[in-house]
Image: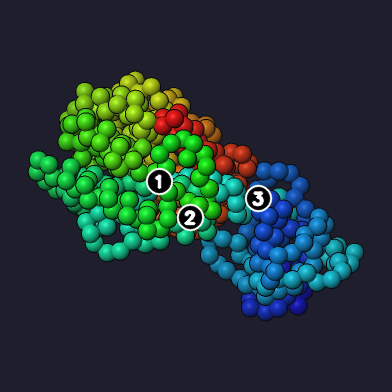
Amino acid sequence: MRVSWTDLGKQRADKADGKRVEITGFALGANSWGGQDRFLLMAEPGCCEGCVPNNPLAVVEVFARRPMKIASGALRLGGTWQVSFDADGWRYRLHDAEMVAGVTRRALLAASPLFCLPVPAMAQATDGMAVDLHSHAGNLIQMSFGRGSYSPVAEPMRQGGMSVVSLAVVSDSPIIKLTDGRLRPGRDPRPGELYSFSQRSFPALHVLAREQGLPIVRTAAELRAARASRPSVIVASEGADFLEGRIERLDEAYQRWALRHLQLTHYRPNELGDIQTEPSVHEGLTAFGAEVIRRCNALGIVVDVAHGTFELVKKAAAVTTRPLVLSHTSLITRPASWTRRILPDHAKAIAATGGVIGIWPVTAYFPNIVSYATDGFARMVDVVGIDHVGLGTDQLGLVGASAIPSYADLPQLAAALRTRFNAEETAKLLGGNFRRVFEASVG
Ligand SMILES: [Zn+2]
Ligand SMILES: [Zn+2]
């Protein structure tokens, strides 16, 4: 049967699910993806760059039986029609698609141009250069205790076009407990306990990288070279608790474990400063916290102030000579107690250092990938500008579900971002901004 664009969203198109259909339209982005075996089809040629595919009924996602030579102009395609009601994707797909010879003028007119929606490339919007600012992928948290087994990291990165993830051990893990829905310190650590835990968690990260063939990024040049075809990791620590107040352990972690990204605090008010989820005890950053920042600047370690209070961030901004990262959070407009989210001034303090804020895909705030892009990313961009926002998935570290559970979902996020941002802006959000901060920090 023939499906026309006016059928989409109506019973006729939905009832064709699983059937062989023909449809005529214009391919989008096929050239920029290179593959030409997966592309988007729409009613008319793209009219204005950056225009919005806000209507899933205006687009058909095409999976070709074999790569097609796609010239400009209308295409008549035959294939198996598939209807999906998954809110995060396109509603209609054409599988096993092949060109049907000859597009007649009548067929072209039947395609009835209804929408002016130049849909962005679904895949490869980042040219395989995306970076995740904060992740525990691969089941790293459990494996730091020797529990379970590693889950795939490299493969979903390749699939989704993710080049680098900042993979974090969790420094205060042994003493953190989920209490009344909040993560809190269950007890004080014993002397030496968190340092010796780091001597298990950092090796667990290195084993994961080795087993999955993920090179460890040590320099800005190595970051520049990283691509999704050969994904890499940055060694990070969520919390500097393993230092136990001893600055020489920072140098040791830099040398021995290739630590290049250090988050000062986590769920325990530690030797470095105060956190958002417990009462303040240090009025922000401690003298030791300032010393750690200066040493990170000198060695070449990215300083991350996620979980820190606004007071800590203001003091850190005054001390650091490099841009700050706040790797996983999102914007709120009114103060709230014990929240991990941040107010506009808190965000602006990060941007003022030239830094970057990673957006956290917590489904309680952003129920799906579209909301994550258009509420999470776009609202933060409204406050701090396009150069200061990034991706911080906290994969396998979230208490609840994630709006982007796998790196293989990255093309959907890119497509959702492209409804608000052009290609260059999207590339900044999905990695470019962090790359700039890493280069400035690590050299
Ligand atoms: Zn965290
Ligand atoms: Zn985390």
Quadrant in which the N terminus appears: bottom right
- In the figure, 27 relative to 247: above or below? below
Residue 34 vs residue 272: left or right? Answer: right
Real-space CA distance between mark 3 and mark 2, rounded to the nearest whole angstrom: 21 Å
Give the mark toward the camera: 3 or 2.
2
- Tell me what residue is drawn at x 34 percent, y 25 percent: 298
Q: Amino acid at mark 3?
A: Pro
| Residue corresponding to mark 2 | 157
Rendering coords of residue 323 (x, y %): 42, 28
Real-space CA distance between mark 2 and mark 1, rounded to the nearest whole angstrom: 15 Å
| Residue corresponding to mark 1 | 216
Q: Element at badge 2?
A: helix
Residue 296 vs residue 403: left or right? Answer: left
- 81 or 218: nearer the viewer: 218
Tag 3 near tag 2, CB within 8 Å: no
- Tell me what residue is drawn at x 83 percent, y 65 percent: 110
Q: Element at badge 1?
A: loop
- Tell me what residue is drawn at x 21 percent, y 26 percent: 288
Q: Amino acid at mark 1?
A: Ile
| Residue corresponding to mark 3 | 120
- Assess mark 3: CB under 8 A from ligand 2? no
Rendering coords of residue 144 (x, y %): 25, 54
Which of the two discs, 3 and 1, labels the residue nearer the N terminus?
Answer: 3
Residue 262 vs residue 40: left or right? Answer: left
Rendering coords of residue 371 (x, y %): 49, 50
Q: Element at badge 3?
A: loop
Decide if residue 286 is in sight here.
Answer: no
- Assess mark 2: CB under 8 A from ligand 2? no
